[in-house]
Image: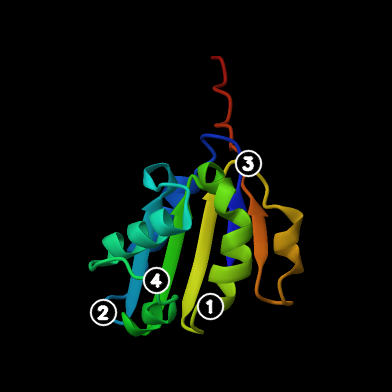
């Protein structure tokens, strides 16, 4: 999984949208969730995920995600509003994801240090910074 963070305007949402363009349907499935539209509860998250993919929410875990395509990328944009679910996502959702499902999180805040305790090679974080355009030279 990858956790991208940075101040407003650094291009996190644009990065997610561009990543969606790089997917190769039908072999790959890219699911982009705007966390501002998700009720910050387990049921709300499950419902939003099933709604984005098509179907009805269930409580049977997350194994079904591995059946929708050869490669699946679940993206959570504006993750800072879902911080109430952070521990649940880390302890319950991430370990339950099938091997062909990846998680990409984008938010303004750095990930909680507990994310870094996931098994080696399963978690990475990147901080985005705002690039300033070069100053115009006066003539």
The percent position of residue 39, horizontal first and vertical second, equals: 41, 47
Query: Which one is in front in this view, the residue at disc 3 or the one at disc 2?
Result: 2
Callout 4: helix, strand or loop?
loop
Who comes first in sequence, dot 3 or dot 2?
2
What secondary structure is found at the residue carrying circle 2? loop
Of residues 120 and 10, the one nearer the viewer is 120
Inter-mark Cα distance, 1 to 2: 23 Å
**Residue 64 occupies which quadrant of the picture?**
bottom left
Q: Are marks 1 and 3 in contact (CB under 8 Å)?
A: no
Q: Are marks 1 and 4 in contact (CB under 8 Å)?
A: no
The correct choice, above or below, for 34 with respect to 28 in the image is above
Instruction: Tell me the quarter of the image containing the N terminus.
Output: bottom right
Residue that label 3 marks: 129
> Which comes before the other along the chain, label 2 or label 4?
2
Sequence-earlier tag: 1 or 3:
1
Q: Mark 1 or mark 2, which has the lower sequence index? A: 2
Rendered view: 66 above or below 76? below
Kindly identify which numbered label has been placed on residue 59: 4
Q: Nearer the viewer, residue 137 or 107?
A: 107
Residue, disc 2: 26
């Amino acid at each position: 999984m990858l956790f991208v963070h940075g101040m407003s305007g650094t291009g996190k949402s644009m990065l997610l949208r561009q990543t969606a363009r790089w997917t190769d349907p039908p072999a790959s499935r890219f699911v982009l969730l705007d966390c501002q539209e998700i009720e910050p509860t387990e049921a709300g998250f499950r419902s939003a995920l099933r709604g984005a993919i098509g179907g009805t929410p269930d409580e049977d875990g997350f194994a079904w995600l591995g059946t929708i395509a050869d490669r699946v990328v679940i993206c959570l944009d504006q993750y800072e509003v879902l911080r109430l679910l952070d521990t649940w996502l880390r302890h319950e959702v991430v370990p339950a994801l099938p091997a062909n499902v990846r998680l990409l999180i984008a938010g303004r805040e750095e990930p909680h240090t507990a994310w870094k305790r996931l098994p080696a090679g399963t978690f990475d974080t990147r901080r985005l910074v705002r690039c300033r355009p070069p100053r115009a030279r006066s003539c």
